[in-house]
Amino acid sequence: MGITKTDLFTEEQNAIAQMAKVLGHPARVAILQYLVKSITCINGDLVQELGLAQATISQHLRELKEVGFIQGTIEGVSVCYCINPEKWAEFSQLFGEFFEHYFVAQKSNCC
Amino acid sequence: MGITKTDLFTEEQNAIAQMAKVLGHPARVAILQYLVKSITCINGDLVQELGLAQATISQHLRELKEVGFIQGTIEGVSVCYCINPEKWAEFSQLFGEFFEHYFVAQKSNCC
DNA sequence: TTTATTCATTGTAATATTGCAATGTAATAA
DNA sequence: TTATTACATTGCAATATTACAATGAATAAA
C-alpha cells in the first residue's frame, strides 16, 4: 500500500527508521558532509556543489531540517544552514547503540 | 522523477545512502534487532513477531539480504537467517566514520 | 503418491519519493 | 517604486515503495 504500519513497531525502531530514511538519499548525505566540512552554507552553495536544481536542494534541506539534522537561520536575503550539534550527537548515539548490540562473538552460532 | 541521480555523488555517499535506505523502514530495523537477540530465525518467526504478512516479511528479508546485512541458508523446509558479521562490522564503521567527522567543537561557528 | 509446510515470486492497489519548472515571498539595491 | 537576489512552495510527471492475496517451488510426512 506504500504506507508504513508504524503502529506495529517500537518508538525506537520508528526513530531509527525515520533517521535512516533521511540519510537514505545520497544528496542528503552529500549535504551533511558538505556542512561538516564547511560548518555553514546557503542553498546556493549546494546548488553549485551538487548539480541539482535549486528547488530540489531546497526540498532536501527541508527534510534534513524536519528530523533535526540541520537548522537554518535567516541572514538578510539568504538562509544560513548548519548542523544541529545536539541532534547530531543524539543520532550518532542511537545508531552506535544499534550496531553495538551485535557482537561478533555471536558469529559462531550463525547458520 | 522518482529516480535518484546517483552519478552526481561519490561512491561513499551512495554506499551510505543505500545502507541507510535499507534501515529506513521500522520492519527491517525490527528484523535486525530480532536477529541480534535471537542469533538466527526463520521467516515464520518474524511473521509471528512483527504481525506483517508472510509475503511482506519475505520482501523485507530479501532487501536486507541484497545489501548484505543478513544471509540465509536453506535448512530442510525452512530458511535460516542470520546477520552477516563482516558486513555488519563494515556498515557499523561506515556510519561511525560519517558521524565522527563532525566535532561538537565546531558548534561555536554555527549560525 | 498425496498432503502439508515453508518460503519465494508475481501481480496489483495505494501511497511515497524524486526532480524540476513555474511561481510566490521577503529582503535588499538601484 | 522597481528590480534583483535568495529561497520556499506548488504542481506535475516519472518512478519507487509498501503491503498482501494468490500462486509457485521444494522438501518432508503420511
Image (cartoon, coloured by chain):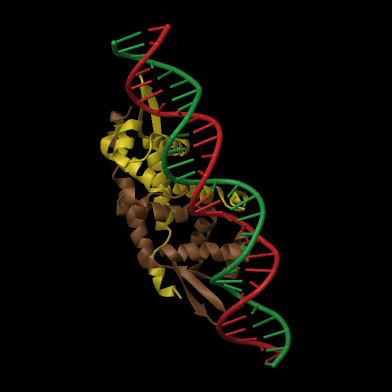
Chain colours: A yellow, B brown, C green, D red
At x 39%, y 25%, the residue is: A73
Count of residue discs: 0
| Residue A23 position (above or below residue B32) | above
| Left or right of D9 in this view: A27 | left
Location of residue B84 by image quarter = bottom left
Image x and y of residue B13, in percent: 33, 50
Residue nearest the viewer, comparing A13 with D26: D26
Residue A111 is left or right of residue A8, and the answer is left
- Any part of residue A107 in sight: yes
- Frontmost residue, A98 versus B53: B53
A61 up-or-down from B99: above or below? above
- Viewer-proximal residue among A47 and A90: A47
Task: Answer whether residue B69 is visible to the viewer in this image.
Answer: no
> Residue sitting at 50 percent across and 56 percent down?
B29
Residue B6 lies, in percent from the top left, at 36, 51
* Residue at left offset 29%, top offset 39%: A49
Q: Position of residue B19 (x, y in %)?
A: 41, 56
In the image, residue B19 above or below residue A73: below
The x and y percentages for residue B27 are 55, 56
D5 to the left or right of C4: left
Nearest the eye: B45 or D15: D15
